[in-house]
Image: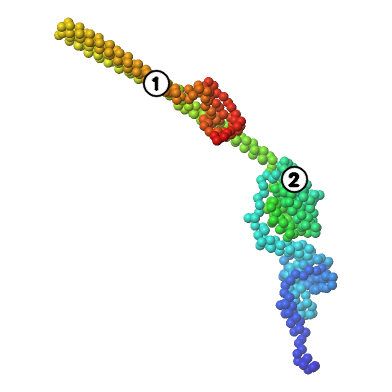
């Protein structure tokens, strides 16, 4: 047995080399959390220390070539996270951690949890802009989810009173720090949704360390914000602080005061805008009234031109013109006949005996009477046709209809004649033109033809 043991024996160096290879290949790089002790800083710039917890310890070496920043802040008793390769120092047979990166344990762990959750929720699309809701331009009521005794709620209320004091605010109290804070924030969020009193919510607290703000990096709170049907504005900490709630909320404000400024407009700007709009409306109304007045004048002129009275007057003018032409034609005819008669009379006097002259004179007298009678008949016929035409025009004239007790009803605004009850509604004003004068009436009831 001893001979066989001697045949298979290896040196200590070989053993340490094999163990080192096993450690290098089998364990690999990892994060180790512990407390620094026995720290040493030789002139070479390397850093040697031991990492320990309640029941164990391990040596660590942080070589100068791997250091990316100052290490003088680390001291015995510091709780740190060290990232590196587990290996063996062959000369002494001590296994140790070859450190590549070191950081304070508290924020380091939280930071990695923060980055891991941020990456997870981003992959699920909770940070996508497409799913985020628009913030109302002027909320009817604002909900604030925060600690009622914190400075954040005072800042928010102060800015809201200064910028737009007309919007009421409801505070939904919740813890904003500590282990119970995420659950209380979620409960307050769900209460606001259930009560449906607000159309925008502010989730806020003042500044602090990463641990102080950690409640707003809770995964369940992030999912509750994403599922909230109301727009949520996240205003956590200072401008440089970013939480998971900031990324998943519909809008991120740099500070609580900034959230209040983003949610409500400045009343001065609104008043100036309203004054501008009022001026524009007044000018537009003035232009509309002027256009309507011009249109009314034009329609009035057309109405006067197209009225039955104007048409009758034009017909009378035509009749008078025709009568004048008729009289002139008759006078011309009489003049021509008289001239012809004189010519014949002269011829008769020159070549006819007295009897023929007398007979001719009698015949001429008869013709004169007939001509006069014919002229009178033509004048009487023309006068009769004129009277018949006048009576016909008067029969179809709306003015004659008005004399029989009827009225022309028009819209008091447009002046358009009303022919159907459906053209007006209860409360409208109408004008009724009578044979003499007009009436302004208001509709108290509308009845269809079938009624």
Q: Which residue lies furthest to the top in this view?
A: 354
Quadrant in the picture for the C terminus: top right
Quadrant in the picture for the N terminus: bottom right
**Residue appearing at x 84%, y 70% in the figure:** 54
Tag 2, which secondary structure? Answer: strand
Dot 2 crowding, Cα within 10 Å, few <14, some 14–19, many 20+: some
Q: Position of residue 433 (x, y in %)?
A: 53, 25
Q: Mark 1 — residue?
A: 388
Closer to the camera in the image, 381 or 315: 381
Q: In which quarter of the image is residue 392?
A: top left
Q: In this view, does 314 lie above or below 366?
A: below
Tag 1, which secondary structure? Answer: helix
Q: Position of residue 98 (x, y in %)?
A: 75, 73
Q: Where is residue 45 in the image (x, y as percent from the top left)?
A: 76, 69
Give the image's coloring scheme: rainbow
**Which circle's residue, 2 or 1, is located before the other in the chain?**
2
Q: Quadrant of residue 449?
A: top right
Closer to the camera in the image, 382 or 168: 382
Q: Mark 2 — residue?
A: 169
């Amino acid at each position: 047995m001893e001979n066989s043991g001697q045949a298979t024996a290896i040196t200590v160096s070989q053993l340490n080399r094999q163990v080192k290879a096993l450690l290098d290949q089998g364990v690999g790089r990892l994060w180790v959390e512990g407390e620094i002790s026995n720290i040493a800083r030789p002139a070479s710039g390397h850093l040697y220390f031991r990492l320990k917890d309640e029941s164990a310890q391990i040596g660590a070496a942080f070589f100068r070539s791997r250091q990316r920043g100052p290490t003088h802040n680390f001291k015995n008793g510091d709780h740190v996270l060290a990232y590196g390769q587990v290996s063996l120092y062959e000369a002494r047979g001590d296994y140790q951690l070859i450190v590549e990166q070191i950081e304070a344990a508290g924020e380091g762990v939280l930071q990695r949890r923060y980055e891991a959750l941020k990456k997870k929720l981003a992959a699920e699309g909770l940070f996508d802009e497409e799913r985020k809701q628009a913030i109302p331009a002027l909320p009817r009521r604002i909900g604030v989810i925060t600690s009622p005794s914190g400075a954040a709620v005072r800042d928010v209320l102060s800015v809201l009173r200064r910028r737009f004091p007309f919007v009421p605010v409801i505070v939904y109290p919740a813890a904003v720090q500590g282990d119970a804070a995420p659950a209380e924030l979620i409960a307050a969020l769900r209460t606001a949704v259930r009560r449906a009193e607000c159309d925008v919510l502010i989730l806020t607290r003042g500044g602090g360390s990463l641990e102080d703000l950690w409640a707003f990096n809770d995964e369940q709170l992030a999912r509750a914000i994403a599922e909230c049907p109301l727009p949520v504005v996240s205003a956590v900490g200072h401008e440089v602080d970013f939480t998971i709630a900031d990324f998943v909320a519909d809008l991120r404000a740099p500070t609580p005061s900034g959230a209040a400024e983003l949610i409500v407009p400045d009343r001065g700007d609104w008043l100036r805008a309203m004054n501008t709009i009022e001026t524009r409306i007044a000018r537009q109304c003035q232009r509309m009234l002027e256009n309507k007045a011009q249109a009314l004048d034009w329609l009035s002129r057309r109405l006067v031109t197209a009225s039955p009275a104007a048409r009758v007057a034009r017909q009378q003018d035509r009749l008078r013109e025709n009568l004048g032409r008729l009289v002139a034609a008759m006078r011309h005819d009489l003049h021509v006949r008289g001239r012809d008669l004189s010519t014949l009379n002269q011829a008769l006097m020159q070549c006819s005996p007295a009897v023929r002259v007398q007979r001719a004179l009698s015949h001429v007298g008869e013709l004169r009477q007939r001509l006069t009678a014919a002229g009178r008949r033509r004048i009487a016929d023309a006068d009769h046709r004129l009277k018949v035409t006048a009576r016909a025009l008067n029969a179809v004239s709306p003015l004659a209809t008005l004399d029989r007790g009827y009225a022309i009803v028009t819209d008091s605004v447009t002046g358009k004649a009303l022919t159907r009850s459906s053209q007006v509604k209860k409360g409208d004003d109408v004008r009724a033109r009578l044979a003499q004068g007009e009436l302004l009436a208001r509709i108290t009831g509308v009845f269809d033809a079938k009624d």
